[in-house]
Image: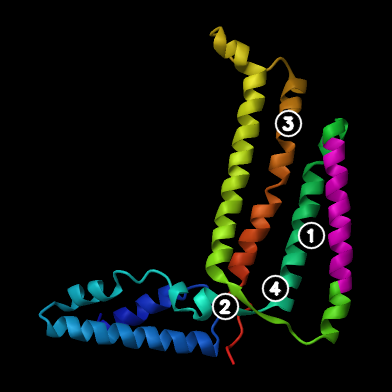
Amino acid sequence: MNKSKELERFVEQLFAGRRSTPAVEELKYEILTNLEDKVRDYVEQGMSDAEAIAAATRDLDSIEPFLEEDGRQPTNLSSLARDLLQHGLLLLLLACIVTLPARLSYTGSVLHNVLLLLAGILGAGYVVYAIVEPRRSAIIVNIPIKLLSAISRWTWLLWGAWLAVVTGFALLLRFGSDLWFGRGLSFSGPYELYALAMELLAPLAAICIPLLVGRARRRVSLYEVSRP
């Protein structure tokens, strides 16, 4: 494979998953041209083709630093909002279905009713949005990609920490004495397993939040628009 083809393949991998727009194609061309110039300079300094390509691409693992306005990406907010409303409604409906057996307990019943209420509110909001949106011009905003990525990571970390703490606390309350006295761990019956599941129900249902934030991060590229 010659140098140009290898650099082109590298640049295509950098842009994997990003919708092709005039702005994206222009950025691809600029990065590829810059890499070709670097490789040419390294070869003139005595490097082999493989060494020059490795040196030119070593520190380039993301295109986010090349985005304008400190990583802000022009995005069709109208389309992104509709996408997230649809996905959020789907997640809430799935959570309602999954938590149906929880209605046997007071805590589970409350959580299920809250999820139903949220699904109803989101569904009504989506219907209103679907009616109003076609009558309005598209709303274009500059979304900070780096900040959104950081929010997505922290959302997953916080959710994971909450789940770990609640799980640990629930297990400690139920099996702490067994561990202290060196007895084997066992459930006294299905009800105890059900009660434990109820204690974990809230953090498990809350997985909808990091899933929705993560989708927002991934879908921003799909609704990217060309810079004026």
Residue designated by label 4: 80
Residue type at the position of mark 4: Leu
Quadrant in which residue 84 is drawn: bottom right
Where disc 1 sits, the SS reads helix
- Sequence-earlier tag: 4 or 3: 4
Residue designated by label 3: 199
Where disc 2 sits, the SS reads strand
Residue type at the position of mark 1: Leu
Q: Is the residue under label 2 in contact with that under label 3 (CB below 8 Å)?
A: no
Residue range in magenta is: 108-128
Where disc 4 sits, the SS reads helix
Q: Nearer the viewer, mark 1 or mark 2?
A: 2
- Sequence-earlier tag: 4 or 2: 2
Residue type at the position of mark 2: Gln
Identify the residue at horizontal 36%, vertical 78% (top origin): 9
Question: On the rendered image, what quadrant is the C terminus found in?
Answer: bottom right
Q: Is residue 216 left or right of residue 36?
A: right
Residue designated by label 1: 89
C-alpha distance separating marks 3 and 1 = 24 Å
- Sequence-earlier tag: 3 or 1: 1
Q: Is residue 4 visible?
A: no
